[in-house]
Amino acid sequence: MRSGRRRALAAVAALLAGVVLFAAAVALSTFPTREGTQPLAGIAGPIRIETDSHGLVTIRALSAGDAIFGLGYAHARDRLWQMEFQRRIAAGRLSEILGKRLVETDRFLRTIGFRRAAETALARLSAEARSQLDSYAAGVNAFLASSSGRPLEMRLLRVEPELFTAADSLGWAKIMAWDLASGNAAGEIRRARIAAVLGAEKAAELFPEVPEQPTIVQDDEWKTISDFGFRTSDLRSRGVSSPESRVASPVPWAALESRFALLDDLGFGGETVGSNSWVLSGSRTKSGRPILANDPHLGLRTPSVWYLARLEAPGLSVAGATLPGIPSVIIGHNARIAWGLTSLEPDVQDLFLERTDPKDRSRYFHAGAWRSFQTRTETIRVRGGREEIVRIRESVHGPIVTDVLDGAKTLGEPGAGSPAVALRWTGLDPSDSTTEAFQGMATARNWSEFLSAASRLDAPAQNLVYADVDGHIGYTASGLVPIRPRADGTLPVPGTGEDDWSGYIPFESLPRVLDPPRGFVATANNRAVSRRYPYPITLDWPEPYRAARITERILAVPRIGLEDVAAIQQDRVSLQARDLMPLLLDTRPDGSEAARALEKLKGWNLEFSPGSDAAAIYAAWYAKLSEMPQDELKEIPAGNVRSRFLIQALATESPWCDNVRTPAKESCGEWKSASLSRAVALLEEKMGADPAGWKWGKIHHARFPHGVFDRVPVLRALFSLEAEAGGDASTVNVGSYRRDGSFLMTDGPSYRQVLDLSDFSRSLYVNTTGQSGNVLDRHYRDFLPLWRDGRYVTFGEGPIETLTLTPATRP
C-alpha cells in the first residue's frame, strides 16, 4: 500500500513538474531575443537596437531607411500582438480569431471601409513616403521570419501573424483618425434622437456654446477677415431643422447609435476629453530657451497606445512617441525642432439622408438626377461558424451606414431595409498624405519646413505647437476642415446636393501664429479662434477649463522651469467646480448626512486629489445633477450632459429642474437637495456610512483594459491593469469618469512629454503602462506607478541590452 501511495505521489509530482515545465516553456517562447547579433536580409548596414532599463529604445543605423527598418523590427519584437490586433480592427477581420461575437463589429468596420480607404490612399502617396512604409514593413517581416518568439495572446488564441504590409500601417492610421473624429457623427445621431423627442429648439438647449475665451490664437494674432479675400456677409446663413421631416420613413437612430458604439469595447470611438499642449518662449523660462509640453488624451488600454523610441542615422535624429504599426515619431523632437499636438476638434463628419427611389432602392437622387449606388460584397470569415456576407452600398457622400442594421440584407428589393443614411468623413477621401506630414516633421529644421510638413496632414485635424533651438515658438492648425455652404454640421442633412461640402478651409487660411508677444501658446481642445474667424470650424468646442487653468498657471510666475511645467501637467484644480460650486453651496440639505457632506464642500480647495473626500462628494453630486434632463429624454440615456448646460440651468431657475414625471413642479433648489441626498447614498454604498473613509481615489480608478482578455475574468487580472487616479474631466491632469456610478476612468493622458530646447537630454517622458506588450515582461506594467504618481524618465540612460541586426551574407 505504501509503495502504491509513493507511486501515486510520484505521478502527481511528475505531472506538476510537467505542468511547470510546460508553463515555463510557453513563457520563454514569448520572449524574443533582445541581445546579440541577428543576420538579416534587406538591410544595407548594421542596425543597433539599444534598450535601457525602462524599455526605451534607441535605434542606430547608417541610413534613414535602415533606421525605419529597425523601428519596424523593434515594434514587432515588443508589440506584435497589438499590431496584429490593430490591423484586424482596420480590416474588419476580428471574427476570424474571436468568433461570432465580433461579426457585427466586423460588419461595421467593413462598411466604413478603413482598409479600403488605406489601400486607395497608399496608391497616391509619394515614392519617398511609400519607401518608408515598405522599409518599416520589411523590418516587421524580418522579425517574423527570424524569431520564434510570439506573445502569449497568440499562443492562447492559436494565431500566427501574416506578413505585414504598408496598407496595414495606413489602416491603423485611419482607425486613429476615427478615434478622434467619430464623435461628430455620433453627436449628430444623438442630437437627431433628442430632437425627435423634444423638438430641435429644446434639444439645442442641451448643447450650449462654450464661452468665447480663451482662444488658442488671439484676434490680433491671425489674419484680418479682409486678408481672406471676402467679407463675412459672403457666408450664407446656416442652420437645419429636425432631420425626421426629411425622410419618408423614420430613421432608427437608436439602433444606428448602438452600431457606432461597437468600437467602444475595443477602446476606440468613445467619448474622450481631448489633450493638452503648450509651448513657452525663452522670455518665460528660466533657461531662456523654449519648453514644449504635451499630453494627448486617448482611450486607456493595455498595451499602451504609444511606444517611445529614438532613431539616429545620417540625416535623421528624432525621438518621442511612436504608434506601433506606423513608421513615424508622432510627437517629439529632432535635433533642431520640437512639436506636440492636440485635436483641433473640427466637425469633419456629416450624415446625409439619401432620397432613394421607392421603386428601385439601387438608386438615389442627387444634384437633380437619379444615380446608382456603388456596391460591393465582402466575406467575413468566422472562427467556429459560417461565413457572413456583407453587402455594402456607397453614395457620392460615402458608405450607407444604415446598411449595418438588421433587415438590411435584402437591399435589392424595393422598399426593403432601413432608410439610407450615408457617412461623409474626411478620413475616407481618396487622397491622404498624413503619413508624409509626420515623416516631414521628423526632418524639418525650421518653422517654414515644419509648416510644409503640417500642410500634408489631412486626418485627423490637429493643433500643432512648435519650438526650435533658435528660440522660436509657434502654432498652426492643420488637417482637412470642411466648408459647409448651408448646414452647421449638428444634425443629419438631406443628400440631394444642397448641403454637400463645397471644399476645405485652405491650409494657408487656418489659424496660425509665430512668436506671439505674450510668449506662449496653450491648447487644450478649446476654441482655436473667436467668432470673428470667417470659417466655421465646429459648433461643439469642448469646455475651456483646462486651457484656462494652464494659462492661469503660466501667468502666475515670471519664469518657468522644466519641473514647473511638469507640475502644471499634474495640476488637479477644477475650474469647472469653481464655476459650479457657488450655485451649489446654498443647497438646503435633506438630513444630517447630506449636511455633513455639504459642509465638507465649503472648505474644499477645488483639487481632485486621490485623497480628497470633498472631491468624492462633488463628483458623486455632479453625476447625480447630470441626470437632470433624464425625465424628458425618456428612454434616451442622459449620459455626460455638458457642464455648461447644468450651470446655465441652475443659474436661471430653468424648467429643466422640474421632473415632468411628477404632478408637482420642482424648483432647482429642490433638485439640488434631492440630487445631493442621492449622491450621499451612492457614496455610502460605495465606501461605507462613515464620511471619514470617503476618498476620491478609492472609487476613481483608471482602467487599462486588454482589448480581448478583459472580457475573460480568469485572464482579466493578468492582462488588464488598474490604478488609483485623481482629477476629473476639467482638470489639466485629466481624470474624466463615467457618471453611471462606477466613476471609472477609461480615457486620459496616454503619454506625457516635457521637452527642453536648451538641452534635449533633460527632456521628460512617461508612458502609461509600459513599453512591452508581453504580459510576462516587467516592462508591460513598470511605467504605471510613474504615470500614476506624476514621475518621468529621460532618454539619457545608456543601454542594458543591445541587439545588432547585420546584413546577411549571400551564399
Image: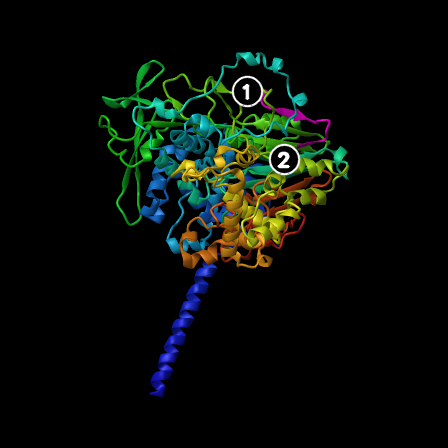
Q: Nearer the viewer, residue 316 or 809?
A: 316
Measure the C-alpha gap from mark 2 to mark 1.
Answer: 22 Å
Report which quarter residue 93 is drawn in: top left
Q: Nearer the viewer, residue 433 or 354?
A: 354
Which amino acid does the dot numbered 2 rest on?
Answer: Ala
Which amino acid does the dot numbered 1 rest on?
Answer: Tyr
Query: Residue 292, percent across and down?
Result: 67, 37
Query: Residue 541, percent across and down?
Result: 55, 30
Q: How is the image coloured?
A: rainbow
Would you place residue 712 above or below residue 507 in this image? Answer: below
Dot 1 lies on which element? loop
Q: Nearer the viewer, residue 152 or 257?
A: 257
Indicate yes or no whether the magenta region holds residue 518.
Answer: yes
The answer to whether one can see residue 305 in this image is: no
State which region is magenta: 505-521
Mark toward the start of the polypeptide (2 vs 1): 1
Q: How many residues crowd mark 1 within 10 Å: few (<14), some (14–19), many (20+)?
A: many
Pointer 2 residue: 547
Going by the picture, which residue comes out furthest to the bottom?
1
**In the picture provided, is 449 more to the left or to the right than 69?**
right
Residue for point 64% across, 47% down = 602
Pointer 1 residue: 535
Give the number of callouts: 2
**In the picture provided, is 171 more to the left or to the right than 750?**
left
Indicate yes or no whether the magenta region holds residue 144.
Answer: no
Residue for point 37% across, 53% down = 158
Query: Residue 67, percent across and down?
Result: 57, 41
Report which quarter residue 228 is drawn in: top right
Q: Which mark is residue 268?
A: none
